[in-house]
Amino acid sequence: MKTLDWAGLSADERAAALARPPSNSSEERIAAVQRILAQVRADGDTALRALTRRFDNVELDSIEVGAAEFDAAEAGLDPALRAAMIEAKSRLDAWHRAGAPTEFEIDTAPGVRCGRVLRAIDTVGLYVPAGSAPLPSTALMLGVPSQIAGCREVVVCTPPRPDGSADPAVLVAARLCGVRRVFKIGGAQAIAAMAFGTESIPRCDKLFGPGNAWVMLAKSQVTALPDGPAIDMPAGPSEVLVIADAGANPAFIAADLLAQAEHGPDSQVVFVTDSAAQVAAVEAEVRAQVARLPREAIATKALDFARLIVVPTLDEAFAISNAYGPEHLIVQLREPRAWLPKITCAGSIFLGDYAPESLGDYCSGTNHVLPTGGAARAWSGVSVASFQRSISVQQVSREGLRAIGPCAVTMARAESLEAHAQAVVQRLEASA
């Protein structure tokens, strides 16, 4: 970890301090992903089986999870885990329903009725990672809002286990959200399958979900194609920025930093404080706590990119956070809510000493599929709106046309678009 005195840094040094870890998107990897996409597009299920043998060392009997495997997963799952997932789903459902967009209509002029209708995206594909750590929580985070939105068809792709089965917890989470079609395919080949469609996997209109560098590259490549699907957001390695004052508990801060560091060696953790003494205490806690983690090696690698920043004032801390645009922002201050208006850019915010990011990952109710890499400056986390189309509607009477038609004619002719003007003029003359 590197400790930095922000006041003493030049502009270039400050930019370097907030830089993300080096990308895994090498030219070789980009080309390899392109080959995988082309192979799946050309050969469908045959390519999926071959790529699964190559990358996962698994010979699939069936690409799709059958009813018997769903039932076995349900029967064999730890009851405590199932109960926890049901509890988490209830909060997710409540939060997403409260924040879901609504239809409306207003009269913008006499005889001019304008509104918005909402229509669910027809077919969506959800990617649920299941590599070194299967993520049934992601199945919930994506399944709940897709269910509320009312998508006609929802499919899940998740990597197979060594025995060719899907992770049971992922299957149970999917079933809790009403998802019945799960495919045992992972990596870039899963993204290709959902983007283009195969004999088994339907072509999807929009793709969702986090993943490794291969998955992220595949998502960015398929959405750039003329006939490619939309994607939820740019996303990459996990990250957290913690702002704390001298009154915060250094053990809590260290635990929050390590909770992100253990995701992967390319995760980034940033700590910003106005207390130099707090930095020293947090460093000591990180060293003590990381040694006790099962994923110590992974977290230790991620800490190579960690930044501990001392600022003159907390105002400066929030300016740094807004410039960085963190996926997760934890505010461990004595009056955290008073600082909320200062925050303009973050994927998800956690206020107070007792709001660890882990709660947002699992069960507070908010969504954990969030923009990373600074994308929070323009993108938002997954919500019900992510699974819907918002369509404007207008109905105009003769009275309405006479009221606003001349405005349209004037503006159309100012833009030298006479055909636009005539579409209005001819109706005005006919209704005179």
Image (cartoon, helix red, strand yellow):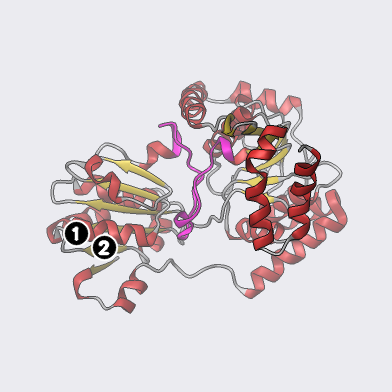
* Amino acid under disc 2: Leu
Q: State the residue position of label 1.
A: 279
Question: Is residue 378 shown above or below 83?
Answer: below
Q: Is residue 258 magenta?
A: no
Q: Which residues are magenta?
A: 361-385
Tell whether 184 sits left or right of 103.
right
Tell whether 331 sits left or right of 227.
left
Callout 2–callout 1 Cβ contact below 8 Å = yes
Q: CA distance from mark 2 to mark 1?
A: 7 Å
* Quadrant in the rendering for residue 1: bottom left
Question: Is residue 424 shown above or below 180?
Answer: below
Instruction: Give residue 344's position: percent from left, percent from top.
Output: 36, 52
| Residue found at x 83% / y 56% | 41
What secondary structure is marked by label 1? Answer: helix
Q: Which mark is residue 308?
A: 2
Q: Earlier in the sequence, mark 2 or mark 1?
A: 1
Question: Is residue 2 shown above or below 104?
Answer: below
How crowded pointer 1 is (Cα within 10 Å; few <14, some 14-19, many 20+) is rated as many
* Amino acid under disc 1: Val
Tell whether 317 sits left or right of 360.
left
Instruction: Give residue 368's position: percent from left, percent from top.
Output: 48, 42
